[in-house]
């Protein structure tokens, strides 16, 4: 399941201190690094119902980016004086013509692909092409952005044209996989892309939402034909003036982190039932803690019929092996720039230590690594369905995360938050019905985390 480790190089220039690097998965595509903004400011436009965010909540400089909202695709560039930005807005051909409009320093929340370090002549050419396409009709907003970029001299990183892309989700997928290049009189040049996760929705769920919005586009089109909205001003945010992101805020030791990729079946299940990110953190050395010296047995006490059914049928070794062959088809490994306290920022933040409000992860510890999988999802559709909640519970069970590994020495639930000094705090308990760790083992593992990864750890006996 292991693949070669990728050495990460963090690009944190021009970002505010609200930003956090994170490793994410895009369907069954390769995983990758994005810039997440967990405390993003947002407001809903009363006329369109779209969620907006202020650009200066993320960027300290005016960016060039391709944005994917829900599902609108748009293109943002700085004005010539670099004091503000303007946006090319596209629409389905039947709705209205495209337009270049001032952003008023806010755009639709979503996933943004920022084009870094473009030379001045390419940026000027991009502005010119945006203006030339303004006032025209296009097949879709994604198709318009592809046409404008192609006319400027951009192609996909593998050389393919951008002119024949019509769906936002397809456009985002191609950018994720192949990147961009631009062509000028000096030849072909790769574009340095930085992906920004600027929406309250989880990264994978937002991109799944793009596809869903495309699917129900005809229904929404008919609804809009018979719906009128009173003219209302879109929200405008006050100027933020946030400090720049300082990479020295992360002070823990460097670590190696892996993220699982599912196969095609797993990707389709995740599409229907919600994303379940699975991470692995390798320990610098094999775990050497006396209290965790003996492996834990799954289902150590079998004194009732329910436990026997779980152990021998529902979560038997063949069943667990089959499920994991789907959900953990491969693993991408990253090292070189990830700090231990940075990894805490990669999991969904909780508002505080309160268990009832925590974004929980099920965690399994072996002699060489820590494995964790998201236990709860924020999506309202998942919370309303008992069936999906059950699937959510099954897909994160400790026995599934452990895969019957004979070196399991601890299992728990884990969550994280930032304290009043903006420092990360990791919380663990001893809640595992499958492995039944003791309070003493919990305290021993917490002590190991503190001294090995230089992080704050709180324990909660269950």
Image: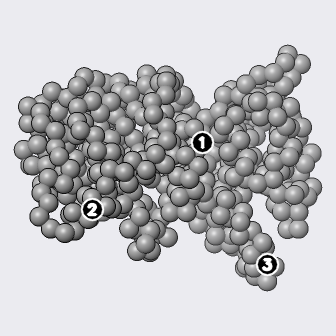
Location of mark 3 (residue) = 222
Q: Earlier in the sequence, mark 2 or mark 3?
A: 3
Of residue 70 and residue 305, the one placed in the foreground of this image is 305
C-alpha gap between disc 2 and disc 3: 49 Å
Write down the quadrant of residue 451 in the picture: top left
Residue 187 coordinates in the image, percent (x, y): 84, 18
Who's the residue at 79% across and 78% down the image? 222
319 relative position to 159: left or right = left
The residue positioned 52% from the left and 56% from the top of the image is: 270
Question: Which label's residue is closer to the chain start, 1 or 3?
Answer: 1
Q: Is residue 94 left or right of residue 56?
A: right
SS for callout 3: helix
Image coordinates for residue 280, horizontal then vertical, percent:
37, 37
The residue carrying mark 2 is 310
- Decide: few, some or many residues near mark 1? Use Cα within 10 Å; few <14, some 14-19, many ≥20: some
Q: From mark 1 to mark 3, how far is it between C-alphas?
A: 34 Å
How many other residues sit within 10 Å of disc 3, few (<14), some (14-19) or many (≥20)? few
Residue that mark 1 sits on: 29
Q: Quadrant of the N terminus?
A: top left
Residue 345 visible in image: yes
Picture layout, residue 148 above or below residue 336: below
Q: Quadrant of residue 422?
A: top left
Tell me residue 196's x, y (percent). Answer: 57, 42
| Residue drawn at x 54%, y 38% as measured from the top left | 31
């Amino acid at each position: 399941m292991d693949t070669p480790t990728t050495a990460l190089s963090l690009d944190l220039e021009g970002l505010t201190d609200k930003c956090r690097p994170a490793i994410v998965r895009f369907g069954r595509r390769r995983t990758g690094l994005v810039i997440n903004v967990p405390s993003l400011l947002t407001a809903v436009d009363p006329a369109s119902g779209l969620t907006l965010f202020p650009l200066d909540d993320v960027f300290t400089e005016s960016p060039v980016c391709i944005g994917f909202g829900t599902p609108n695709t748009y293109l943002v560039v700085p004005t010539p004086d670099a004091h503000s930005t303007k946006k090319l807005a596209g629409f389905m051909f039947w709705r209205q013509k495209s337009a270049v409009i001032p952003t008023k320093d806010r755009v639709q929340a979503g996933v943004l692909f920022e084009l870094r370090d473009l030379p001045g002549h390419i940026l000027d050419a991009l502005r010119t092409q945006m203006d030339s396409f303004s006032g025209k009709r296009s097949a879709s907003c994604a198709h318009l952005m592809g046409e404008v970029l192609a006319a400027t001299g951009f192609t996909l990183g593998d050389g393919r044209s951008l002119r024949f892309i019509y769906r936002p989700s397809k456009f985002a997928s191609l950018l994720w996989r192949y990147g961009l290049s631009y062509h000028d009189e000096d030849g072909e040049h790769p574009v340095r892309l930085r992906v920004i996760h600027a929406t309250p929705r989880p990264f994978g769920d937002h991109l799944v939402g793009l596809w869903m919005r495309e699917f129900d586009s005809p229904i929404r089109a008919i609804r809009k034909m018979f719906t009128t909205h009173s003219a209302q001003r879109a929200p405008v945010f006050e100027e933020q003036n946030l400090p720049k992101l300082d990479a020295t805020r992360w002070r823990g030791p460097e670590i190696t982190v892996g993220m699982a990729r599912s196969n095609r079946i797993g990707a389709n299940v995740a599409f229907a039932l919600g994303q379940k990110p699975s991470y692995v953190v390798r320990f610098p050395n094999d775990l050497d803690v006396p209290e965790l010296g003996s492996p834990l047995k799954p289902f150590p006490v079998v004194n009732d019929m329910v436990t026997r059914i779980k152990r021998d049928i529902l979560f038997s070794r063949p069943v667990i092996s089959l499920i994991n062959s789907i959900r953990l088809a491969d693993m991408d490994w990253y090292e070189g720039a990830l700090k231990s306290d940075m990894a805490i920022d990669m999991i969904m933040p909780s508002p505080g230590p309160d268990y009832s409000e925590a974004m929980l992860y099920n965690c399994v510890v072996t002699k060489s690594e820590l494995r964790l999988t998201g236990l709860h999802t924020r999506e309202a559709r998942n919370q309303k369905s008992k069936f999906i909640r059950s699937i959510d519970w099954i897909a994160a069970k400790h026995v599934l995360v452990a895969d019957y590994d004979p070196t399991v020495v601890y299992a728990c639930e884990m969550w994280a938050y930032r304290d009043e000094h903006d420092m990360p705090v990791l919380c663990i308990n001893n809640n595992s019905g499958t492995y039944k760790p003791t309070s003493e083992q919990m305290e021993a593992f917490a002590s190991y985390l503190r001294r090995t990864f230089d992080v704050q750890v709180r324990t909660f006996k269950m």
